[in-house]
Amino acid sequence: MSNEAVVHAHGAVTTHEGHGDHHHEHHHHETFITKYVFSQDHKMIAKQFLITGMVWAVLGGLMSVLFRLQLGYPDATFPWLEDILGKWAKGGRITPEAYYALVTTHGTVLVFFVLTAGLSGTFANFLIPLQVGARDMASPFMNMLSYWFFFAASIVMLSSMFVETGPFSGGWTAYPPLSALGDASPGSKIGMDMWLISMALFVVSSLLGGLNYIATVLNMRTKGMSMTRMPLTIWALFFTAVLGVLSFPVLFSGFILLIFDRNFGTSFYLSDIFINGVGALPNEGGSAILYQHLFWFLGHPEVYIILLPAMGMVSEILSVNSRKPIFGYMAMIGSLFAIAILAFLVWAHHMFVTGLNPFLGSIFVLLTLLIAVPSAIKVFNWLTTLWRGNIRFTPGMMFAIGFVSLFISGGLTGIWLGNSALDIHLHDTYFVIAHFHIVMGVASMFGMFAGIYHWFPKMYGRYLNNTMGYIHFWVTIAGAYLIFWPMHYEGLAGMPRRYYDYSIWESFKQFAELNRFISTVAMIVFAVQLLFLFNFFYSIFKGRKVTTLNPWGATTLEWTTPIKPGHGNWVGEIPEVHRWAYDYGKDGKEFIAQTTPVGADESHH
Amino acid sequence: MTMFLTTAVIVLIFVVIFQIAKASEYVSVLKGEEVSRKQNNKINGFLMIGFLVLGLIGVWYCNELYYGKTLLVQDAASVEGARVDSMLWVTLAVTGIVFIITQIILFWFAYKYQESDTRKVFFFPHNNKLEIIWTVIPAIALTVLVVIGLRNWFLFTGEAPQNAMVVEVTGKQFGWIYRYPGKDGSFGKKYYKNIDNASNSLGLIWEDELAHDDVVMEQTMYLVKGKPVKLIIGSRDVIHDVGLSHFRMKMDAVPGIPTTLWFTPKYTTKEMKELTNNPDFQYEISCDQMCGNGHYSMKGVIEVVEQEEYDAWMVKQKPYYVQQFPEKDPAAPKPATDSVKTASAKPVEAAKKAVAKL
C-alpha cells in the first residue's frame, strides 16, 4: 500500500478535519503514462477495464457472427471468409476446426474477459470508492496490477489465435482428456497451452482485483457509511468479489493439474486412453471427472460473479429512475447473500449426466432449485419498486427493465435444467444455450449497458446520445428474444449444442430455416452494438456536456463529487453519510441525499 | 461486390441514424430539454406496452411454427421417457404461468407508472407480509417439483429391472462400438492396451473365454421392444455422451470410468416411422459432449425390433473372436435358437458379471 493510500484510508475512516485542503491543493505530477497507461486512479483503471472489455466484446461477438454464418448457411460459401481466415475457411466455408475454435474462444472471452473483467472490473473499480466515500482503492498499486495482468492475459489469448495448429477448440469448459491431448484435437496442442497461460494470468488479475474490492468495502467506508447504508451496487460487488476470491483459486488448481497432465506426464485426469494414430497412452488411474468438479466449483459461482454486479446496478438504477426506494432493501441483501452461499453448493448440477452418484445428485437438485427462492424475491422486489413509482425512461432505466425481463425468462428455464431427471433429457441441447445466454449472457450485458448509460456522465462528464441509446435498447432486447427464444424449441427437439452441421441428422435437420433466421437476427444485433460503441466513443469527446452535479437526482455519494472528479474524488473533505441510499419520495421530497442529516421531523420507516 | 454493397448500406444506415440522433439532440435543446425528455418518456412508455403485446403474440406465433418440430408432439419412445415428458409438462405449466404473470406485471407497471406530473410516488420501502408471501409460495412450488423430479431421478438412476438385456457402448473419435455378451450372457474382460483398430477395437483379452462369444459391431445397435435394456457406457479416448433424445435419456461416456443407463423401448423403429409420419425415421445416438472436430458427425443408430426379429438377427452375428480367428470357429455351432434363449435367460448375472469385470 502506498503512503498516499494510507493517508486516504485514514482520511476516509477517521480524520476528516483539515484533510480536504490537502487534496484540493496537492496534485500528483501526472504524465501521459501515469495518467492514462499505468494509472493508479480507480476511475481510470475502471475505464481501462471497460474499453478492453469492449474490444473483447466486439471480437467475441464477431466470432459468434462467423459461426452463426456456418450454422445459418451450412451449404453456402463466402469467398471473403477465406480472405480473412485463410486456411481456416478454405473455399469460403469455415472448417470444423475453425468452427470449434470460434465457439470455444467466443465462450471463454465472453464469460471471462467481457462479463467478468469488463463488468466487475469496470464497475467495482469505478463505483466502490465513489459510492462508499473513499479516495481510491485500498491498494491502488495492486489495482493497477490487476488491470495489467488482465491485459497480459488478453495478449496471450489473442496470440493463441495465430498459432499454426489454431487456438484451443474443445469448448470453453476445456474438459480433459480432449483438452489434455494434442493428439486428440489440433486445438489442444500449443493453442491450449496458451489458453491455460492466459487463464492463469486472468485468475491472478481477478484475485488482485477481488481482494482489493473486499478490503475497500470493509475498511474504507466514509464516516456514517455503515454496511446497511451502502447502495445495493456495493453489496453486489462485494459478494461478487468474495465469490471470485474463494472460487478462482480452485479453478487455478484444476488448471495446474491439467498443465501437469499435458506437459509432465502425470495422470490426474487421464486413464485408459487409446488415441487413433497414436495408440494406447501409458496413463492409468486418473479421473476425467475430477477436472469437472474443480472447474465447476469455479464455474458455477462464476455465473453469479457475472450476474450479481448486474443485479446490484439494476437495483440502484430502477430505484433512482422510479423515484422510489428499492423495495425490501434488507431482503435484497439477504437474497444476494443466499445466492452467494448457494453458488458454492450447486456446482455438480452441471454434471448430472457424468455418472454422478445419484444420491449426491439429488442433494444438488435440492440446493439448485433452492436458488429460485432468493431469485424470486429479487424479481418481486424489483416489480414492487416500479409499482406506484414515477418512472423516467432514461436509456439506463430501459436496460434495467430489460434485465428484469430477461432474468425472469432465463431464470425460469433454470428450474427445468436444475431438476436432474429433466436435465437428463435437456442436457447439452440448445435448451441450455437458450437458458444461459438469456439469463447470464444477455441479462448481464443489459446490466452492463444499464451501468454504462447511467454512470457515463460521471465517467466522462458528458451524456451518451439518448436517441441512439433507445434504438440500441429496442433492437437489442427484441433481437435477444428473437435469437434465443426459438432455441428452446430446438432444445426440446433434442438438438445438441456444438454441432458444426446438422444436415446428416434425421432428428435435428428440420430447423435449417430457423437457424438461418437466428443467424440473420444475430448479425443485425451485432451491428447495433457497433452503433452503441460509436455512441460511446463519439460522446466521450462530443457528447452533450453535464452541467449539474447530480443529473439523475440520485442520493448516492458519487454525485457529490465534481463533474469531472480528479484522483482523490472529492475536493475537500469526504462527505459524511447520515442515511441509507434510498430516500426517494420520502415525506413528499423528491429525494434526500445520503449526505443530508436526518431532520428532526422526518418520518421513520 | 455484394460484400461491398452490404457494407455501404450498413454504413449508410449508421450515418442516417447518427444524423437523426444528433438532430434530435438539437431539437431537444430548442424545445427545452425537460419538454422533450417528457415526450421521449411517453413514447418509451407506450413502446413498453407495445413490446409486451407483440412479445406475447410472438411467443404464441413461435409456438405455432415450431411446436410441431419438437419431440413434444411425439410420444416418448421409452417407458421411462414418458415420465420425463409428464414432468416436463408440469414444469412448463408452473414456469409458464409465472412467466406470463411477471412479464405482464413488469411491462404494465413500466407503462402505468411512467412519469406524470400529477403522481406522488408512494414511499414503500418494505412490507414483511408481502415478502414472506413471495418467499413461501415459490418454496412450496419448488418443493413439489423437487419431489416429482427426485422420484424420477431415483428410478432412472436405480438398478435396471431383472429381465434387462445388457449392451456395452463404447465411444471413440468419432463413432460408437457396441458389444453384446453373446450366448454365455457375460462380457469378457478387456484392457485398453490391447486395443488395435484392425483386429481388436475394444481391447478384449482373448485368454478370457467369456470374451470368445462376445459380439462386437459398429453402426447399428439392435434392441427389443418392451424389454428393458441396460447400457454399460465407456469411452476409448475422450469424453463422449450417449444422447438418446427419443428415449429422453443421456449419459456421458468417460474413459476409465464406466457409467450405466437403462430404459425400456416402447416402439419399434417401424412403429415410430408410422407414428412420426416420417419414412426415414431413425433412432439416432447423438454425441452430446464436445469430443473434437468430428463431434457433429458422431452418429449411431438404434434399431428397435420385436423379440423374434432380434433373435433371428442375433443368430446371424459372428462373435468377434471368431471373426478375428476364423480357424477357432466351432465346427458345428449349436442350434441358434438355443443359444439366444440362454442369452436372454441369464441377463442379470450377465450384467452383474459385466459390471464386476469393468
Image: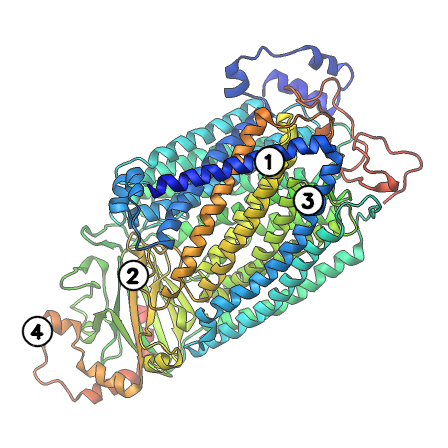
Q: Chain of mark 2?
A: B
Q: Label 2 near label 1: C-beta < 8 Å?
A: no
Residue at 20% over, 72% down: B211
Q: Chain of mark 1?
A: B
Q: Residues within 10 Å of mark 4 (few under 14, many from 20)?
A: few
Q: Which residue is mark 2?
A: B298
| x and y percentages locating residue B218 in the rendered image | 23, 68
Residue type, mark 4 in image: Pro
Question: In the current view of this chain or complex, which residue is farthest to the right?
Answer: A601
A456 relative position to A38: left or right: right
Query: What numbered label is drawn on residue B21?
Result: 1
Mark 4 or 2, nearer chain start: 2
Report if the CB atoms under discs 4 and 2 are less than 8 Å apart: no
* Mark 4 or 2: the one toward you: 2
Q: Answer yes or no: do the residues labelled 1 and 4 have beta carbons within 8 Å?
A: no
Q: What is the three-letter code of the residue carrying label 2?
A: Met
Q: Is the same chain shared between marks 2 and 3?
A: no
What mark, if any, has residue B326 been given in the picture? 4
